[in-house]
Amino acid sequence: MISRRNWMRQAAVGAAAVTAGTSGPAAAPQPPADGFVDAHVHVWTPDLVAYPLADGFTRADMQPPSFTADELLAMCRPLGVSRVVLIQMSFYGFDNRYMLDSMARHPGTFGGVAIVDHASPGVVARMRELAARGVRGFRLYTSREKAAAWEQDAGMKAMWACGADDNLAMCLLADPDALPIVERMCAAFPKTPVVIDHFARIGMRGGIDRGDLDRLLALAKFPQVHVKTSAFYALGRKAPPYDDLGGMIRELRDAYGAKRLMWATDCPYQAAEGHGYAASLALVRERLDFLSADDRQAMLRDTATRLFFPST
């Protein structure tokens, strides 16, 4: 199992190993009229009075110490990114208030992926309450050990059934060895939208494992499954311009079609020294010559819009 803390720690090591100063392209295509969509960003505030941390977390876990919604917008808007899907941060636990408050302060700018307690008797009611406030997905930590219990877990099955009924996505922070279990869940719930975060973290240890990638490609047979091409800073060579991830992106495009892929940064971690927001955007926007203009538009805007901003 790869824990969230180990994921961030390994990403930070990768960032430290890269020479700073890589910049985005000098000239680039103009963004669509209503801008690109970053499908995966975490935000938090240093105000621990209004927004206390969950048990087991301390201020030391907040690295960087602050990454507020306003700080995010100052970073992404100059690059043509006008909307962002906010992902509930782990150190707030089931308290989604900071994400929800950020969404309310910037209507139409932020979508939301919440975290709920699947063991709670009221989990479906809670999902629908959050959906009424703009949440369109629910994050599930998908290690092999955790996922192994899903098929027999009443609360988890209720979540997946609600996802099918209400068109709410199950957003999986999955490890590669959990994908066979994910495959069985997708077969059991064929109408539940599913989003696989960060290529299922394939390549986190360096090279792209062929068996892991084949397992991810196999999920393309389920039309409800989507993949985020994201967290470039933490995968493969872990260095801009991230061209080494192009082969994996091409295979995913060929298997899923671009309309089921979406670009995302996983900021603030993508913005670590030696990486940068612009470098992530540039890989999909202009560096991968096998992507057509329609592919780029789907990955940079349309897929995430359909899933997380359905009224626009």
Image (spheres, rainbow, N blue to C red):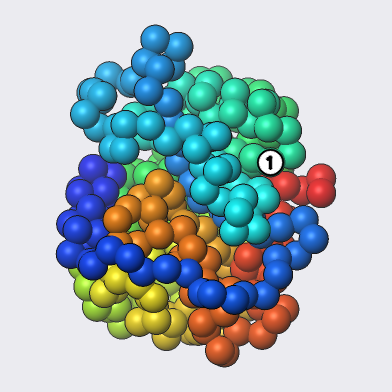
Residue 194 visible in rendering: no
Quarter residue 99 falls in = top right
- Count of residue discs: 1
Q: In the rendered image of this protein, does residue 123 appear above or below residue 299?
A: above
Residue at 25% x, 32% y: name it: 61
Q: In the rendered image of this protein, does residue 145 appear above or below residue 285?
A: above
Residue at 49% x, 63% y: name it: 278
| 294 on left or right of 192 | right
Q: Position of residue 271 (x, y in %)?
A: 39, 53
Q: Which residue carries the number 1 mark? A: 109
Q: Position of residue 280 (x, y in %)?
A: 46, 66
Residue at 59% x, 38% y: name it: 112
Q: Nearer the viewer, residue 235 or 74?
A: 74
| 129 on left or right of 118 | right
Q: In the rendered image of this protein, does residue 124 appear above or below residue 145?
A: above
Q: Position of residue 238 (x, y in %)?
A: 28, 69
